[in-house]
Image (cartoon, rainbow, N blue to C red):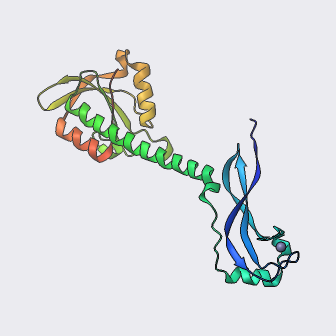
Amino acid sequence: MFIIHGERFKKIYFGKIVSEPCDNCKFTTYSFYAIFKYIHMFFIPFGGAGKKRLLVCDNCKREYDEQELSDNKKHDLANSKIKIKTPLYHYTGLIVIGLSVVSFFIYALVAHEINEANYIKYLNSPMIGDYYVFDNEKCKIYEQNKTETNDKDKMNYYVLKLIALKKDQYIFNTAKNIYKSSYYAEKAIEENKNHKEFFYDNVGYIEKDKLMKFLLDNGLYIHRKK
Ligand SMILES: [Zn+2]
């Protein structure tokens, strides 16, 4: 990719000082500037890269840059109490990036809340054919034999398919396979939707209240066909 970048300079006026006479015209009042160097990318400032002081004689306009400042001028400058403030403008790029990062987190948070609201909506208006994916290690709906397996390879995610509704009970088919993560479980649902042998023949049920609790405590993934 072609990136235009480099350094730019900006001269900003900070005030007047009185000091020893100008070498050129013997005038004693000077304008004080700071010259900021900043890095740009596509001409958007991405942070300061140093500054230099500059005095300009108010009469003859002779410029005294950092190296030319006599000890007396430096001293008078220090005593003037003029403060050099780096303009925020030089950090535009970084500020924009920072705001983007913050926006992303806010977006993720809101998306998460919407998701949770959706789950509750789904739970309250179940549809035959909904799939539920849950982490059995947290929900403990099924007994699992405690074989020592590598945490990484642990299969905890179960898939249920809602096949009937009773008053306060959800009746499910259970998938034969268990998955490593909700991602793999959801993928399996997509791939096996129409395969009858994806599920065990027998059915199970869970009380609605219990499901709700699983959802709020542990996160339960609900997959509804669109
Ligand atoms: Zn002068």
Q: Which of 113 and 25 is in front in this view?
A: 25
- Rendered residue at 63%/73% (across/down): 83
Instruction: Give percent across and percent down for residue 206.
Output: 20, 34
Q: Quadrant of residue 189?
A: top left
Q: Is residue 149 visible?
A: no
Q: In which quarter of the image is residue 9?
A: bottom right
Q: Which of 110 and 15 is in front in this view?
A: 15
75 left or right, relative to 193: right
Instruction: Give percent across and percent down for residue 167.
Output: 11, 29
Q: Which quadrant, please, contains the C terminus? A: top left
Q: Quadrant of ligand 1?
A: bottom right
211, above or below 67, in the image: above
Q: In the orientation shown, which residue stands out farthest toward the right? A: 24
Q: Which of 83 and 41 is in front in this view?
A: 83
Q: Is residue 94 visible?
A: yes
- Rendered residue at 34%/21% (across/down): 225
* Number of disc labels: 0
- Rendered residue at 67%/80% (across/down): 80
Q: Quadrant of residue 29?
A: bottom right
70 left or right, relative to 130: right
Instruction: Give percent across and percent down for residue 216.
Output: 27, 45
121 left or right, relative to 52: left
Instruction: Give percent across and percent down for residue 149.
Output: 47, 45
50, above or below 189, in the image: below
- Rendered residue at 64%/75% (across/down): 82
Q: Which quadrant, please, contains the N terminus? A: top right
Q: Nearer the viewer, residue 137 or 105?
A: 105
